[in-house]
Image (cartoon, grey):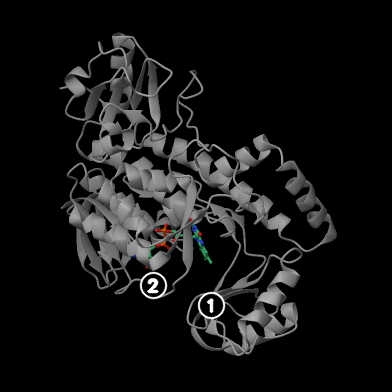
Amino acid sequence: MFDVIIAGCGPTGAVLAAELRLHDVRVLVLEKDTEPIPFTRIVGLHIRSLELMAMRGLLERILKRGRRRPAGAYFAGIDKPAPAGLDSSYAYLLGIPQPVIVHLLEEHAIELGAQVRRGSAVAAFQQDDDGVTVELADGEQLRTRYLVGCDGARSTVRKLLGVGFPGEPSRNDTLMGELEVGVPPEEIAAKMAEIRDTDKRWWFRPFGEGVYSVVVPAAGVSGRAQPPTLEEFRQQLRTVAGTDFGVHSPRWLSRFGDATRLAERYRVGRVLLAGDAAHIHPPIGGQGLNLGVQDAFNLGWKLAAQVRGRAPDDLLDTYQAERRPVAEDVLDNTRAQTELMSTEPGPQAVRRLLAELMDFDEVNRHLIEKITAIGVRYDFGEGPELLGRRLPDIDVKQGRLYGLLHRGRGLLLDRTERLTVGGWSDRVDHLADPTAALDVPCVLLRPDGHVAWIGDDQRDLDDHLSRWFGTPN
Ligand SMILES: Cc1cc2nc3c(=O)[nH]c(=O)nc-3n(C[C@H](O)[C@H](O)[C@H](O)COP(=O)(O)OP(=O)(O)OC[C@H]3O[C@@H](n4cnc5c(N)ncnc54)[C@H](O)[C@@H]3O)c2cc1C
């Protein structure tokens, strides 16, 4: 009997497993693939994900394997630098190959005690009042109290649950691959400079040792069932660039679409959905992996409390209430970005206008706070502007705030030095620190770093401790 079985060891599943292990939950991750995906697709970790990695002491490890890039110019690729003074100590983007980040996250989950079984696909399940019986593709049956589908866009768990996945099908597919070229780099650079301002739908980027990362529209290339061929890449390049750059010897070739869909529900009884299993959208702006990882940080501590029998009644349902609107917003911003990528005169004019507007600091800041998720504010009811937002990595007596959050516990940051976490001290830490760089008396932080309460009154604090952390000891 496991407490939680996670279907899928992508970035979402791996982070969720680690978050659950911080609370001693018995967790098994079932991954259908025997080996991690070979595609060396570079993904970008945006500011909020970097902050979350820092909050769990993982960032140093990840930074060594990625490349820091400026935080700006990701909204529809509009070339504007990030506004000055972004409110984060991690105000950059980290480019990192997806298999590398998945490996690091899986390794971290295993170090914390998660079991990961590769080559095990979830094929069926039945839930009852006490738990879920999960059946693998080879017929083996396992029993768990909760099941979480982190099994990607084509999620078996979502389909078996019968949860609808409404939205728009893919309208524009794109071919992507890594190939060697038969022409000098200067020729490629000159061509790319020529098209840079007019057509952002394709690129040709050096990837080291004569290999280029190639992205080109798939329009006219038929059939999604088979992977694209080298000849199809050549054809598409000739259509958009007038030359195929002599591409040859592909390392890998793939195809992705721009479908946009959102699960109708994130939870049915003892079964939940997270990551691409719950939402898909075009990769523009590089938000999908970030969104899934942030789902996992939101869900982990709540599901752990539920498993341990001390979650307040509706805590687990706040997962959908908080995260589904965030996904809706990301879906909308990718729809908008996709329109801005069109080469038609109308969208091109809107793009020029938006580029002008982004010269206003407030507009630029609003867009970057969206893409990087530092603007997310959960609805915790009436209260000061900070309530429901994440707290940046501020200076505290012991050094930096995030250094105090590695164990995934709540934290009372108390500038009055007269409050107490009383019977919740087994799950909430208390830092009495009049020097904390805050302009409010006290904040209560949830394990995901969001501000759950602001004030200076003990009785009010106790109510909020109950609301988020259940009954005291
Ligand atoms: C071209 C491209 C570029 C992208 N760039 C970015 C970017 O820069 N930044 C960003 O944030 N996102 C980016 N994304 C999106 C990102 O890759 C996904 O959002 C992310 O991989 C989702 O993670 P996940 O763990 O939810 O799902 P997945 O990564 O799809 O993982 C799901 C896992 O579940 C396993 N699985 C499936 N079915 C079963 C089953 N029945 N039983 C057990 N296991 C199962 C799969 O093998 C897989 O390992 C990009 C996507 C594309 C296509």
Q: Which mark is residue 177?
A: 1
* Looking at the image, residue 451 lies above or below residue 53: above
Q: Position of residue 111 (x, y in %)?
A: 19, 56
**In whole angstroms, how far apart are the C-alphas of marks 1 and 2?**
14 Å
Q: Earlier in the sequence, mark 1 or mark 2?
A: 2
Mark 2 close to ligand 1, CB under 8 Å = yes
Residue 127 visible at all: no
Q: Element type at marker 2?
A: loop
Give the quarter the ligand 1 occupies.
bottom left
Local packing at callout 1 (Cα closer than 10 Å; few below 14, some 14-19, many 20+) is many
Residue 155 visible at all: yes
Q: At label 2, which amino acid type do we have?
A: Ile
Q: Which mark is residue 37?
A: 2
Q: Position of residue 214 (x, y in %)?
A: 58, 76
In this rendered view, identify the residue nearer to me: 159 or 390: 390
* Looking at the image, residue 446 lies above or below residue 144: above
* Looking at the image, residue 394 lies above or below residue 344: above
